[in-house]
Amino acid sequence: MTAKIAELELTEPILHDELVERCKQGDTLSFAALYNKYCKAMYNTSLRIVNHTGDAEDVIQEAFTDAFRSLEEFHYKSTFGAWLKKIVINKSINQLRKRKIDLIDIEKTNTLHLPEEETLDENEIRLKVEDIKKAVRLLPNGYRTVLTLYLFEGYDQEEIAEILRVSHTTVRTQYMRAKQKLLQLIKQGELS
């Protein structure tokens, strides 16, 4: 039984690679199959960043169009899904920039004179999945973007700094503030 599971796990990436190869050869059914396979996950990734359904839909359309146009640049150094996710994340960040939602570079501001925010005890707060989702949607765009890239998309802080074109200090500060704001929203019950 273990051999069959391992065999199934090995064949799935091969099937994705075959789909990509068929797309490279112009097979329209394979384009549709790849789109259907990744559309929902990529939409959710974008939505967590841009926090607007219309913008997320636009991002997905642009991302798939760009990915399909540049399939020859995909050389299997990662999975197709990882490659596509990077495109989606970059397009989502660009969408935020179009809306002129900028992250403030903490190193370029005078933050030494800002009062520290109240620290909340994470253990005393009972978290529910829906409450967390609602609270994340209520975060300011910069906080939500950093938190999403770090917690949900698995990027480390250095990678986020590079993606957002800000300093590592800015990412770390935005993450800590986002986490505190998220906990505060949940604790205060401002989720309706």
Image (cartoon, rainbow, N blue to C red):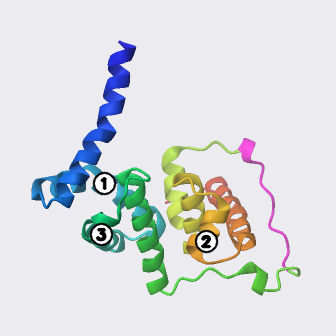
Q: Amino acid at mark 3?
A: Ser
Vertical side of 90 occupied by 180: above or below: above
**Magenta residues, start to end:** 114-124
Q: Find the distance from the CA under tag 2 to the CA under tag 1.
A: 26 Å
Q: Is residue 116 magenta?
A: yes
The spot of residue 15 in percent (x, y) is: 25, 41
Q: Would residue 176 be found to the left or right of residue 147 on screen?
A: right
Q: How many discs mark residues in the rendered view?
A: 3
| In front: label 1 or label 3 | 3
- Residue tagged 3: 70
Q: Would residue 149 be found to the left or right of residue 33 on screen?
A: right
Q: Which of the 4 quarters of the picture holds residue 179?
A: bottom right
Front residue of 4 and 146: 4
Instruction: Identify the residue shown where x is 31% and y is 27%.
Output: 8
| In front: label 3 or label 2 | 3
Vertical side of 173 occupied by 31: above or below: above
Q: Amino acid at mark 1?
A: Lys
**Res. 140 visible in picture:** no
Earlier sequence position, callout 1 versus callout 3: 1
- Residue tagged 1: 40
- Residue tagged 2: 162
**Res. 98 visible in picture:** yes
Q: Is residue 190 magenta?
A: no
